[in-house]
Image (tube, rainbow, N blue to C red):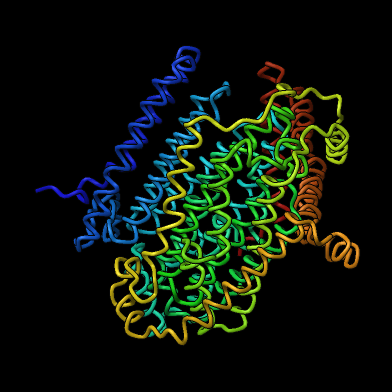
Amino acid sequence: MTSAADLAWLIPVFPLLGAIATGLGLISFNRTINRLRKPVAVLLLTSLGAAAVLSYAVLAEQLSGAAPVEHLFVWASAGSFILPMGYVIDPLGAVMLALVTTIALLVMIYSHGYMAHDKGYVRFFTYLALFSSSMLGLIISPNLLEIYVFWELVGMCSYLLVGFWYDRDGAAHAAQKAFVVNRVGDFGLLLGILGLFWATGSFDFHGIANGLSDAIANGTVPGWAALTLCLLVFMGPMAKSAQFPLHVWLPDAMEGPTPISALIHAATMVAAGVFLVARLEPLYSQFPMVGLVIAVIGTITCFLGASIALTQMDLKKGLAYSTVSQLGYMMLAMGCGAPVAGMFHLVTHAFFKAMLFLGSGSVIHAMEDVVGHEPILAQDMRLMGGLRQKMPITAITFLIGCIAISGIPPLAGFWSKDEILGQAFTTFPLLWVVGFLTAGMTAFYMFRLYFLTFEGPFRGDDKTLQANLLAAAGKGSEDEHPHQGGVLHESPWSMTLPLAVLAVPSMLIGLLGTPWNSRFAGLLNPEEALEMAATFNWSEFLPLAGASVAISTAGISLAVLAYALHRLDLEELFANRFPVINTFLANKWYLDDINEKIFVRGSRKLAREVLEVDAKVVDGVVNLTGLLTLGSGEGLKYFETGRAQFYALIVFGGVIALVVLFGVLGNPVS
């Protein structure tokens, strides 16, 4: 009997076929297809729904104890070289398949309401289906080369979706920035893949790990070279998962439609880097130095993202830096040698962060009816407030997400984040301190977002404040912002239903990873789950968990005092007393300015100098060659007279010249 795993190759094919059908329709019959919004939505939802059903069947088989399945075929061969392609289904892949299809399906339903009035509705759904297919293909790839193919497809789809509103300068620039920064990481990834193939002769994950170990033991590959190759491969996840210093593209990518922020930049694409590091765990576990580098980069990233989020006034930018911070936690877990903990946080974070982003989209959708479609106004929390009364479903689900990400038990974020901090405490205590402090910052800035958005008086009607915000952004208040003057209202069911669905796993899914009986670890690594249960000790668990909850509670309390009760004036207490630190955080650690000065302006200056060399040296040589050819042609044309006597004279003169030459240079005959 055919199992679901044997049909798993259809999971990325279903949304791909839907995307191809609508894409070809848009190319051939653009106006007609753009009018068929509901049929296109039904087609793509059905294709993605079929992929989701098959993914759940695959996950159910893995939960029941089915063995991993791998199907390969020879894609290319030359002599002894054989390049296999195919797909692999194992517990890690099954979890990711179910996660991605669930989030993608809910985001597509949400998009039906959010993009209802957008002229690019059909194109948007087509891009969504194409991205989902690429991400699902990446998950089931059995080797590094096939992963790289889908890795690039995911990057291409991200470029298309971030720059979806390409007529906005901000969106166009953000798409270019995301593309270029990811190319930096992908270049390192490609070099690492080719280097590992040179060292091991394999693209397979276990083949690379075993081959590199043997090569080091035999002395054919020096240790420093193996370490370099591992770090080169890690550059890909650094860029894709927005790790310092390649994180700068993610906050700018919020220029895309909000459903994209929920799908790509919270749950799926940015998780691809963490997923790849988990796949490479057999390789990275051989090199403690690689683990240390990954852990340090993850720790810097989680602290950096949280610190910048403290000062953000743009709702989506605040959530974006929160995502950067949480991705840092996942990488910290990977560096500590705890891929199960990192993947568990990836799953829990995907649900509550997708819900938070979709909730922010619901808020922005309502704000646009009041302040217009200018993102500077619709996304600024200084114009919000009091939305809980008008948007109760959005407010409740957003609050659940804030509690979950803050690490308050028994919601999902507590169990996964506490597991990471526990691993860090035993492996790298200094990094645990940073992660511990970041947990308090996370609770503070998330409830700051909640109180500024949903509590207090509504500030969206303040025309003076609107004008000041536009002036600060370099835009005139006379610019037209259509649909002003509307009233706040709850979003339609197509937008609130996904929020309600995501709220359930945001509250409960963490219970699958309790340290004394972790079913999640039992699926991914049964030996580790048994060891966790056997070594679990309440006297060790409660102090660390209690400290984590305490600092999160302190962060929430500070946010309540400052933004709900208004008992604390943080501007007076902190911003005015420490203006340098406040400016440093508000300017995002000046990393964008540094990149602009060194890389953007530097590359442009280098390009201008290269252009100067091209114009003066290369073009000069070419022009000189042409001039010499022209001059010689002009001179020689007078020897072409058409008279036989003249040609005979030239031949005779040439013979005389040769005789004289040989007579002068030749040696006498002995």
Closest to the observer: 517 or 255?
517
Seen in the picture, residue 570 relative to 228 is either above or below; the reply is above
User: Position of 64 compared to 614: left or right?
Assistant: left
* Whole-percent x, y for residue 126 in the image: 46, 30
Seen in the picture, residue 647 relative to 340 is either above or below; the reply is above
Q: Quadrant of residue 565?
A: bottom right
The residue lying furthest to the top in this view is 32
Closest to the observer: 565 or 629?
565
Q: Quadrant of residue 257?
A: top right
* Whole-percent x, y for residue 95 in the image: 35, 56
User: Position of 102 compared to 119: left or right?
Assistant: left
Closest to the observer: 553 or 265?
553
Closest to the observer: 544 or 335?
544
Which residue is depicted at the point 66% across and 25% down? 648
* Whole-percent x, y for residue 473 in the image: 83, 39
Seen in the picture, residue 363 relative to 437 is either above or below; the reply is above
